[in-house]
Structures are given as structure tokens and as C-alpha cells.
Amino acid sequence: MRAIVVGGGIAGPAAGMALHAVGFEATVLESRPSGAGSGSWFTVAPNGVAALAELDALEAVRGIGVATRRNIMVGATGAPLGSVGLGAPLPDGTPALSFRRPELAAALATEAARRGVDVRHDARVAAVETTGSVAAVTLESGRRLEADIVVGADGIHSVVRSAIDPHAPAARYLGLANFGGITRGTRLTAELPPESWTFVFGRRAFYGALPTPAGDVVWFVNEPRPAITRTERTAMTDAAWQRHLVGLAAPDSGPFADLIAAGELELAGDSTFDLPRVPTWSRGRLALIGDAIHAPSPSSGQGASMALEDAVVLAACLAASDGSPADAFAAFEDQRRARVEKIVAQGARSSSSKTAGPIARIFQDRMLRFVFRHFVTDESQAWIHDYRARLGGARRIP
Ligand SMILES: Cc1cc2nc3c(=O)[nH]c(=O)nc-3n(C[C@H](O)[C@H](O)[C@H](O)COP(=O)(O)OP(=O)(O)OC[C@H]3O[C@@H](n4cnc5c(N)ncnc54)[C@H](O)[C@@H]3O)c2cc1C
């Protein structure tokens, strides 16, 4: 059986490895050139790390991950608001790991290729079809490739999703522009708790920072605002954005304005979207995984983890089916839809707490303390972090 996976982000190479492990000849098509890719850091929670381990891919990426155990929330005055663990570590002690997004994507693609998955870059898919016993993609170059199934792991603006359902809902803007960066070799690491994100509900923005064992600090800023226009993007330089970010953090206590001022911007003005419900996940020999069907707000901290889970579960469903992709895709949806939609809904709620207006902000600290004491706790999040995606018995040794 042959599978084409569209997209070489997080879900794509993972799906390539998972499908290869259950006996597919897999090709991953990524539109970007090899080694290219923007983005700053995100955290893969234990449920996502466990999916990597299930694919025997954890060792291939462990070295570029930073151990991350808790999210610590503080207010604009520096007052503590609460703290939530990122889930119990795996049995071997591996906790949640934070990665630079493009580095994780590249490491997964390299590992997939090492195992014999055909990973192609500079390969943008322009059209997708499913007819009888064949699924096919046409690249922008005009080249056509056929397979038994096509898996769309092509992210929030998926072309495979449009091929499955031309009326599928588009992603929705969450009212936050996202920026990310790193400050290297800074003494400010000493002001931040190790192996933890410190999240600040600031006066003008929500932002956070994670110290690394190398003595760097990784940071991000979410600014509540309308989506950045093309004109504005063209007019702003990285240096201008960085001055703007320093201004957002300046009224609040803590080392954040200094950190941002001393750092390098890695991601400027990424509009944050989510995709709460995609009614149709598959058609014929086409199926979707990852952000293409359930992009959560970045606030959920689960986008990459869910994408990795999907890759494992889809391959397990295909391995368990009697050769009918439609049955396997239905089983996949059955196992996945309720979980991922619940996580996306939860992410949208935490995202809205970052866009509080000036009046709401007066009560925000009190309200957040209550939320982190009673509702968003280690126990209440366990159903997310304790989930384990299993490949099943059909796996081949990689
Ligand atoms: C700022 C930010 C912070 C985040 N923080 C977290 C976090 O803390 N934890 C977490 O788990 N998740 C986080 N996420 C979400 C996470 O990045 C995504 O959920 C995750 O990358 C989804 O993986 P994916 O492979 O489905 O999609 P993507 O990573 O978007 O990959 C899709 C790939 O498909 C390629 N592609 C698109 N169209 C085509 C085409 N036509 N042909 C070929 N290739 C194509 C793209 O180039 C891309 O490489 C965050 C996201 C953002 C924006």
C-alpha cells in the first residue's frame, strides 16, 4: 500500500513514520525548501512525547528539546496567580519538552527519511483527488503522484481539507498577534524558575519566558489586536517590532522588557487562528490529521501533541482495518473527534483571557487566581496529558 502525506510540519513526518511502521510505502511532500521554516518555541506535553516514543522517534529529537515541567502564572505586578503542571513524565522520567518549531519539524523529517520514508521538499501540492481505488495529488510543478491514500497534514490552511469538503469552515482569527524570540547567554535566567514557563498576564499583552540549560531564555508575546495587515507588515522592520514589544512589557514588573530588548526576534507578528470544528474529516481515500482538522489556539499548548497523537492513531486504524481506507478513517474519527474538539474549546477559553479589556483587567488577577485554584489544576488537566496513543501490534522495527 502506498500513502502520500501532504505537509512536512509536525504531523506529516510523524505520519510518514507511523505509516511506514505499519507497512506503507510513504511519501511526505512539503512545500518549503529543506531546512526552511519559521516559528518560535512550543511545548510538546507528555501525551505528545509519548506519541514520539511510540514511534521510536523520541531519541531522535530529545537532544533539541528543553525539559519543561510547569506553567507558572503571574500578574502585571509580579504577583503569583497560580501554577499548573505539564503532566506526569513518561515512565523513563522524560517530562514535557519544549522545541523550536522548525527544528522539531526538521529533526522529524530527517528521522523519517533515515527510515526509508520518501521526504520531498520544494513540493507544493496544488490539487488533490480521490477516484475509485486511487488517490492522487498534483504538484505545483504539474507532476502528478498516485497512491492508495492521501493524508492531509498540511496545517491550518489545508488544500486537502478543501478537496475533501469545499465548504469546510476556514480558520478563525483569535484576536492575538504572536511574536517570539530568544535572548542568549543572559544573567536574567537567574530570575526565572528553571524547567518552567513563566506566563505574565500583563497590562498590554500576555507574554512568557522559559530559561534553557544553555543559559538562554526563550520568550513570546501575544498582543491583543486586529490581524496585522500586509501594509503594516511591509512597513515594520524586526527592530521596530522589537521596540514595540519592549513597550508592551514595559509597564509590568519583572525582567521581561529587559529580556526582550536584549534578545533576537525569531517570529514577528504571526496571526493566531483556531479551527474549532471541521465537519468532514475524510472522503474516499483522503483523510486529514493535525492542524488541518483541529487547530487549537496556541494557548492550549496542545497543537503539536495532538498532531503527533493523530499520526499514531491513524496508522493504527489503517493497520487494524481490512484494507478499506474508509473504515479506517471512520474509526480514526471515532477515536479522535471528541478529544480534540474538547481541547480546542478549552484553548479558545484560555485565549480569551489574554484579550481582556481594561475593565475586565481590573478583576482579572482575582478571577485568574480562583480559576487556577479550582478549575485549571494538575488534576483537571490529567485527561489531556495522560492520554497515550498506541500503534498496536502491526508495527515493524524501524
Ligand atoms: C505561536 C504558536 C505557538 C504554539 N504553541 C504550541 C505549544 O506550546 N504546544 C503545542 O503543542 N502546539 C503549539 N502550537 C501549535 C503547533 O505549532 C501546531 O499545532 C502544530 O505544528 C501542528 O502540526 P501540523 O503538522 O498539523 O501543522 P503545521 O506544523 O502547520 O505543518 C503543516 C505543513 O504543511 C506544509 N504545507 C501547507 N500547505 C502545503 C501544500 N499545499 N503542499 C505541501 N506542503 C504544504 C506547511 O509548509 C507546513 O510545513 C503553537 C502554534 C503557534 C502558531
Image: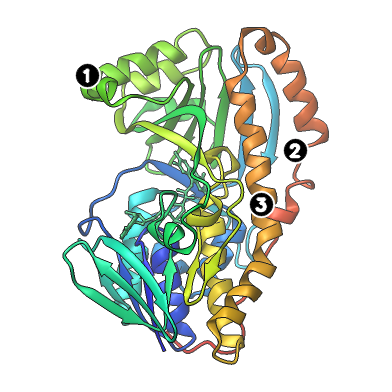
The answer for how far apart the CA atoms under marks 2 and 3 are is: 18 Å
Residue shown at the point (31%, 71%) measured from the top left: 137
For the residues bearing labels 2 and 1, Cβ distance under 8 angstroms = no
Q: Residue 235 carries which label?
A: 1
The answer for how far apart the CA atoms under marks 3 and 1 are is: 38 Å
Q: How crowded is mark 2: few (under 14 residues within 10 Å), some or many (20 or more)?
A: some
* Badge 3 or badge 1: first in the primary sequence: 1
Locate residue 210 relative to residue 267 in the image: left or right: right
Colour scheme in use:
rainbow
The answer for how far apart the CA atoms under marks 2 and 1 are is: 40 Å
Q: Residues within 10 Å of mark 1 (few under 14, many from 20)?
A: few
Locate residue 268 relative to residue 375 in the image: left or right: left
- The image quadrant that residue 118 belongs to is bottom left
Kind of residue indicated by mark 1: Ala
Could you tell me residue 163's position as x and y percent? 42, 62
Residue shown at the point (58%, 74%) measured from the top left: 329
- The image quadrant that residue 350 belongs to is top right
Q: In this view, does 134 lie above or below 336?
A: below
Residue picked out by circle 2: 376
Residue shown at the point (76%, 40%) measured from the top left: 377
